[in-house]
């Protein structure tokens, strides 16, 4: 069968004359319609667990911009929540998790709450029913290392120091935690696929903080186990790995994890990536979110450099990290025009 969705076809290895486009965190605070619905629901978790509202948020950027991919509106911290930690969002600060995962007793004391993920599957079904057939539907999860950093610190943390210390001081506990995350993430992604997503992205936002040996152990190893497990359960799903900050470790990640496509952040030279990553592997990225905010010819030039670097391979146009809340809508429109008319 010929794949008619440009994004899904690209993730499966077929280069498109015009690269498909979606943006990480495209469903979010830079959109006035998101901010209105978010204010209406009162809190982030209230919004993410209201399947009707979460489906609406997923579709908002598709309606406005016609992106090639719709990414499920949820959060990577739904997994710690399903593992039994408390989760809340402090206004103006960010997520909080408790109890912090610092001892074996805390890990053993967590009572799994898999039903906390049920609203997410309902969101997927609602989006699936409404999405037009050319748009690829992406699910996601945090990769185990990144999720572990939040579970251990109880919040976002500078340099992920607590998690890195635990990984050295008690690798047995770290491994037990990571394997719990791997197991629930597999169930979670399988559930998303069963409900209707066609591709998934593993966000490893803090992959860049690890030394090479620790990167092998805590990024590549667990990611490879999720990829192998998910392929066994859902052979058709396309898997994107996004190890933010991995830099020179990207080629090893690409070769050793079994992913279908690789996301690269804005610090990576696209010409280096085009030359150094496996020739048949689709690459996703990597516009600097701040170039998008700058707009004008700064934006045009940055877009053109990326398009030129990946002209000969399967490429998904994206940012190098999530879109920022102060991004002007007109700049997103300009970006789409540039990609779709220059390529
Ligand atoms: O891409 C999308 O549009 C889908 C939705 C999505 C959200 N979070 C919604 C969200 C996705 C894919 C994520 C991933 C996520 N969440 C990551 C990995 C990607 C990255 O940015 O590094 C991480 C580390 C988180 C954890 C998280 N969630 C933080 C640190 C915060 C607060 C700060 C911030 O970036 O907003 C959140 C809250 C969150 N998740 C919001 C949204 C739209 C903002 C909540 C609000 O409306 O107040």
Image: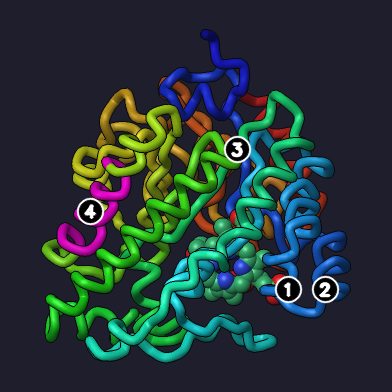
Mark-to-mark CA distance, 3 and 1: 23 Å
| CA neighbours of label 1 inside 10 A, class few (<14), some (14 to 19), many (20+) | some
Residue 259 seen in this snapshot: yes
Mark-to-mark CA distance, 3 and 2: 25 Å
Residue range corresponding to the magenta coloring:
215-228
Whether residues under marks 4 and 3 lie with C-beta atoms below 8 angstroms apart, the answer is: no
Whether residues under marks 2 and 4 lie with C-beta atoms below 8 angstroms apart, the answer is: no
Mark-to-mark CA distance, 4 and 1: 34 Å
- Residue 219 is situated, as x and y percent measured from the top left of the image, at 25, 59
Q: Earlier in the sequence, mark 3 or mark 1?
A: 1
Q: Residue at x 53, y 39 (%)?
A: 194
Q: Is residue 161 left or right of residue 263?
A: left
Q: Earlier in the sequence, mark 4 or mark 3?
A: 3
Name the residue carrying label 3.
196
Disc 3 versus disc 2: nearer the observer: 3
Q: Is residue 328 left or right of residue 245?
A: right
Name the residue carrying label 2.
41
Q: Nearer the viewer, residue 17 or 207?
A: 207
Q: Nearer the viewer, residue 293 or 190?
A: 190
- Residue 138: image quadrant is top right
In the rendered image, the vertical position of residue 93 relative to residue 304, given as above or below = below
């Amino acid at each position: 069968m010929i794949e008619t969705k440009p994004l899904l076809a690209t993730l499966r290895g077929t280069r498109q004359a015009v690269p498909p486009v979606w943006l990480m965190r495209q469903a979010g605070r830079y959109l006035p319609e998101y901010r209105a619905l978010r204010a209406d629901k009162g809190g982030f978790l209230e919004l993410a667990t209201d399947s009707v509202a979460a489906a609406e948020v997923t579709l908002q950027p598709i309606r406005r911009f016609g992106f090639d991919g719709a990414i499920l509106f949820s959060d990577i911290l739904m997994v710690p929540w399903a593992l039994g930690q408390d989760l809340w969002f402090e206004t103006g600060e960010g997520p909080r998790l408790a109890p912090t995962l610092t001892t074996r007793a805390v890990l053993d004391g967590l009572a799994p709450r898999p039903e906390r993920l049920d609203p997410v599957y309902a969101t997927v079904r609602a989006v699936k029913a409404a999405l037009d057939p050319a748009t690829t539907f992406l699910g996601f999860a945090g990769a185990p290392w990144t999720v572990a950093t939040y579970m251990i610190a109880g919040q976002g943390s500078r340099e992920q120091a607590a998690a890195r210390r635990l990984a050295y001081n008690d690798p047995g506990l770290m491994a037990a935690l990571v394997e719990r995350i791997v197991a629930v993430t597999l169930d979670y992604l399988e559930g998303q696929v069963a409900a209707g997503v066609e591709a998934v992205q593993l966000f490893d936002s803090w992959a860049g903080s690890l030394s090479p040996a620790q990167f092998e152990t805590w990024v590549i190893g667990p990611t490879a186990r999720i990829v192998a497990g998910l392929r066994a359960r859902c052979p058709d799903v396309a898997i994107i790995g996004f190890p933010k900050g991995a830099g020179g470790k990207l080629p090893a990640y690409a070769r050793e994890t079994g992913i279908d496509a690789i996301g690269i952040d804005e610090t990576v030279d696209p010409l280096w990536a085009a030359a150094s990553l496996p020739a048949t592997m689709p690459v996703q990225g990597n516009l600097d979110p701040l170039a998008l905010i700058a707009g004008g010819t700064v934006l045009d030039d940055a877009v053109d450099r990326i398009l030129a670097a990946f002209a000969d391979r399967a490429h998904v146009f994206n940012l190098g990290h999530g879109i920022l809340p102060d991004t002007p809508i007109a700049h997103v429109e300009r970006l789409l025009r540039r990609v779709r008319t220059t390529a």
